[in-house]
Each structure stands twice: as structure tokens, then as C-alpha cells.
Image (tube, grey):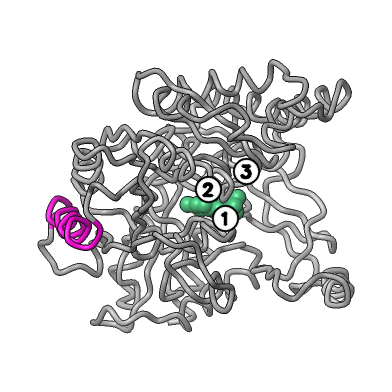
Amino acid sequence: MNASENTAFRLPQKRNLVTELPGPNSRALTERRRASVAAGVGSSVPVYAADADGGVIVDVDGNSLIDLGAGIAVTNVGASHPAVVDAVRDQAGRFTHTCFMVTPYEGYVQVAEELAALTPGDHDKRTVLFNSGAEAVENAIKVARLATGRTAVVAFDHAYHGRTNLTMALTAKSMPYKTNFGPFAPEVYRMPMSYPFRDDSGLTGKEAAQRAITQIEKQIGADSLAAIIIEPIQGEGGFIVPAPGFLPTLASWARANGVVFIADEVQTGFARTGSWFACDHELVVPDIIAMAKGIAGGLPLSAITGRAELLDKVHAGGLGGTYGGNPIACAAALATIETMRELDLPARARHIEEVVTTRLRALAEEIPAIGDVRGRGAMLAMEFVVPGTTEPDAELTRAVVARALEQGVILLTCGTYGNVVRLLPPLVIGDDLLADALDVIEGAVRAAS
Ligand SMILES: *Cc1c(COP(=O)(O)O)cnc(C)c1O
């Protein structure tokens, strides 16, 4: 199955460089930006976008680059899928905003219905919509605290949950996310993650979970614990897939102890990992699931969906926000979900996994600096190390990404140690374009190592 055959792309699905990168127009914008945009906002690629479609981004100099970032796992259906564009246009022509808390509208309710159907578990569910991933996470914690009457929250090593005050506290990595931005929200406790590449060999998922549970019981006490929040596959922390059994063991301990199990599926959700949600792979049913990124084809929308008995405990007015569930974003989400179903994008993500891991595993046989190839669906990564060790090699990682960009392939890095190259292509990327990108990556890895 090839999703590219089902979609007539507007832009040629080809890598094509007509200037050096960044080209003169991008360089001029970088100059203007220095004088107007705060330095605290970074951009990993110094190339300015003019157009984007399917698997390509065309820059302001006319270069066509292959997009293996999807705006950090957002444009799973592409950056201008016609169904999403039409839905946005149509809704914008009727009304752009009324505020759901003032004059509600059907789109919000429809999104809530879709999320109840798509998220794991067949229990009674309720949904609230917000604007960003961090906002969804914050609200999941608010609900968990109110519903349990407890305050403590457990997050994990290598976790990333956002940049607001509470989500900074939940996030593990200091630089660049937390350094000098404190004080942070209290009552957040960090536990060891299951990280198969770096754990003692032979440590099972169940044992890794037990290691965390023992610490929770000793350091916090289940009676004080409102919630455990975890990314079922960690994103910014390094595309870490926990050992099988880790998530189910944590989830069942939480259930047995009245602790709300929150899955942060902001990055992993919406077909990205080869199923609708990453929890589906181990049949884990979270009490609350936080979603954003892939949900609305690029428009800002986020959500929490959870057990009705938890969500409905909150008094009216306790949850919400002016823009939360904006009608244009809701229309985009409905079109995105419909498109994902029509093109069977979970299957497409599994196909991408097969194509990419076959190539990267073969490359890893040849290049000892590739310590690990991992991930699920179209959320895939290579971890670079000093050959024969697990010592991270962030410099090599940066060199690989820089070389790939020179050739017109946008790659992102991640990882606590900055030594992971991550691949997050739009799920509609065609096979030929993906193969071309993998050729470039192979060449970049060979040349850099
Ligand atoms: C990106 C991300 C967030 C934060 O989302 P924003 O929309 O940037 O606030 C939270 N959790 C995870 C797992 C993410 O990947």
C-alpha cells in the first residue's frame, strides 16, 4: 500500500536543491529575525518555509527538501492535505471563534465523540479540548489531583512534557528546557525509566517497573500519589521504547492503588507508531490520555480524554480556556481523523517502520557508532555512541544531521545526551521520496563516522 498513490500532491515529491543551504532569502530572513524574534526561540533548520505538501517543504529560495520531521510529529497527514485545507476554509468562512464556554458548537462535541471512540478502552469517557500539548498535560494533572484528593505526581527519567511551569517540573532535561527558569512546581517525583539500550542487560520491563514502584512506595507512598504520567514511547528524551511489560505493570499497579495513570501521547498519538495510540501496542488502557501534535493536521489543538468518573468530578468552570477547541482547529481535527482512516495511516506507519528499520539495521551492522536502532511505526531513531561503548556521541549526531541537511533532508535530533537522530516523516510520504531520504542518511552517516 502506498499512501502517495491515494493523494494527488500539489507539489512535486522530489528533493531538489537550487541554491546552497541556507539560500540567500533564508539568510536574509535570519538577519531580520535576529532583530525582532527573541533569541530564546531556536530553530533547528535555518531554512525558511514557503510551501509544504506531502513529504516535501519548499523553502523561500525554491529548494525542495525532504521533511523527516513533520513539524515534530504534527503533520502526519502532510502539511496541506486537501481535506484539512477545505475543512479549515469552510469553517473559517462561517465563524472563526465564539468560545465554547460562551456559545458552544457541534465541532467540539464531534471531536470529543471521535476521541472517545479512538482512544484505548471501551469505558465511558469525557474529553476537554485545549491548544497545546503542555496545556493538555497540565489539565490531566489538575483532574487527577482533584479526583484523588492527593497531590504527588510521578514522572520519569528522560521525560518531556512541555515548557509551562508544571510541565517543566515534569520534564527531566535541564538544558535547554529548565535551566534558570525555576522555581518549579512542587510535588513532582522522578522515577527510573525502562531504557533497554542503557539498562543492565536482561532487566525485563516488569523488573524495571518494579524498580520504579519500590521507589514510589518508599519515597512517596501510594496514598499520597495522585498520578503517574508517562510517554509510552519517550519523544524528546530519545525515542525510548520501554521493555515489554513495563507499561502494563505500572498501569496495573496504579489501578490497584487508586493512582491515575496518565499517558502523554502528545507525540506518539494519531497513527504515528503504527496504531492509533502507542498504548495500543501493549493493550494498556490509561485513565487519562493527553493528545496534541498529530491531532489536527497542523492546527493548534490538544485534548485530554479520560474516564467519565474522573473528568466529571471537576466542577463547572474548573476546566477550559478562551481558545480551547477552537472551531477551525476542530474542523481540521475531524478532517485529519477522517483522512487517517481513509488512507489507513496506522498501516502506512507500519510500512514505513519496515522500510526504514531494514535499511538502518543493515547500516548499523556496518557502522559501529550506531549503538541502537529503535522505535515504532514512523517514530524511529538511531542512537550514536563511541564504538564498542554506550558513551553518547552528540558531536557525530550533529554532523550526521548537518550533512543530511546539506543534501536537502530535514532530520531532527533528540535524547537526554543529544545523541539520537529521530525520523518522523509525514505518514503520507511516498516510497520513492523515503528511499531517497534514506540514501542521503546512509551517505551522511558513512561520511560523518
Ligand atoms: C511536544 C510534547 C509536549 C508539549 O506539547 P506543546 O504543544 O509543545 O506544548 C508534551 N508532551 C510530549 C510527549 C511532547 O512530545
Instruction: Identify the magenta region.
Output: 204-220
> Is residue 389 rendered magenta in the image?
no
Instruction: Give the residue displayed 13% in from the left and 66% down from the top.
Output: 201
Q: Secondary structure at mark 2?
A: helix
* Residue 235 visible within the image: yes
- Earlier in the chain: of badge 2 and badge 1, it is 1
Residue 395, percent across and down?
48, 83
Residue position for label 1: 68
User: Is residue 134 left or right of 218 when viewed as pictured?
Assistant: right
Q: Within 10 angstroms of label 1, few (less than 14), some, or many (20 or more) residues?
A: many
Above or below: residue 204 compared with residue 364:
above
User: Is residue 149 left or right of 92 when viewed as pictured?
Assistant: left
- Earlier in the chain: of badge 1 and badge 3, it is 1
Marks 1 and 3, how far apart at CA: 11 Å
Dominant SS type (magenta): helix
Q: Secondary structure at mark 3?
A: loop
Image disc number at residue 75: 3
Above or below: residue 85 compared with residue 414:
above
Within 8 Å: ligand 1 and the Cβ of disc 2? no
In the image shown, does 68 or 164 lie closer to the viewer? Answer: 164
> Given the image, on which type of amino acid does mark 2 rest?
Glu
Residue position for label 2: 138
Marks 3 and 2, how far apart at CA: 23 Å
Q: Within 10 angstroms of label 2, few (less than 14), some, or many (20 or more) residues?
A: some
Mark 2–mark 1 contact, CB under 8 Å? Answer: no
Above or below: residue 358 compared with residue 88:
below
Marks 2 and 1, how far apart at CA: 29 Å
Q: Mark 1, mark 3: which one is toward the viewer? A: 3
Q: Quadrant of residue 17?
A: bottom right
Q: Mark 2, mark 1: which one is toward the viewer? A: 2
